[in-house]
Image: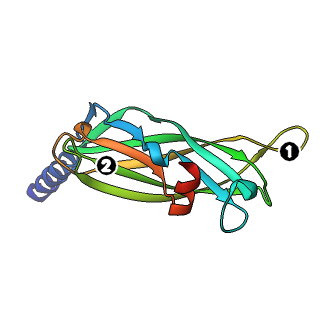
Amino acid sequence: KKYLFFLIFFLLMNCSSNQLDIVDTTCPVVLSASDHKYYIAGNTQPIDVENLRYSAIINNFSFVEGCLKINENFDSDLSILFLIKPENLEDNFFELPVYMAIIDSEKNLIQKQYYKFEGVFSKNSEDNYIETEFIKKIKIKNKNKENFSDNTIILGFMLDKEKLKILN
């Protein structure tokens, strides 16, 4: 009986220590970088207005189900809406190179992540490619014990000098 008692006691203690502490928290501000809000892709190099395959814009973004702290760690899904406009397509495929930067209240870079989202254009009833809404989610986790909500998240497209010159 003693061993059974200790076994049950031991199991109960282990189970009770694995509880998640989940708390709603304020979401950080999200911005799109003004110089990196638009993206273009060309059929050939160098890119110019005549050989554009498609253009894209970061149209909107929001936290899917609010923001949470799980065991003092920030955890949330950020949903991003892109609008992609076909120009002179050779195929229906597109890719969007995107970055997410997190800066603190003093404008120090805390974290930077890079993504490559891939998709295909939608077609209309006449079988023509049309402007396509494309939604992607980014999982944001941060183990910083300070108030993550005081930070700012910046979204933008990764652009080379050639694309920046054309877009600006």
Residue 95 placement (x, y as % from top left) = 62, 58
Q: Which residue, given by chain and number where applicable, does mark 2 sit on? A: 102
User: Residue 34's image quarter?
Assistant: top left
Q: Nearest the camera: 126 or 25?
A: 126
Q: Amino acid at mark 1?
A: Asn
Between 121 and 47, the residue placed more toward the observer is 47
Label 1: element kind? loop
- Label 2 neighbourhood size at 10 Å, few (<14), some (14-19), many (20+)? many
- Residue visible at 66% across and 53% down in the picture: 119
Query: Which residue is located at x 51 percent, y 58 percent?
Result: 159
Query: In this orientation, which residue lies closer to the viewer: 68 or 140?
Result: 140
Is label 2 in contact with label 1 (beta carbons under 8 Å)? Answer: no
**Residue at x 32% of width, y 34% of height:** 27
Residue type at the position of mark 2: Ile
Q: Which mark is residue 52?
A: none
Relative placement, left or right, of 111 versus 50 is left
Q: How is the image coloured?
A: rainbow
Q: Is residue 19 visible?
A: no
Q: Which mark is residue 128?
A: 1
Can residue 52 be seen at all in this image of the molecule? yes
Residue at the left extreme of this rendering: 2
The residue under the point 35% across, 51% down is: 101
Number of labelled discs? 2
Marks 2 and 1 sit apart, C-alpha to C-alpha, by 39 Å
What SS does tag 2 mark? strand
Pick the front one: 11 or 41: 41
| Image location (x, y in percent) of residue 79 | 49, 40
Left or right: 154 as drawn, with respect to 103: right
- On screen, residue 64 versus residue 130, left or right, reads left
Image location of residue 150, percent across then percent down: 23, 37
User: Where is residue 69 drawn, in percent x and y?
Assistant: 26, 39
Q: Earlier in the sequence, mark 2 or mark 1?
A: 2
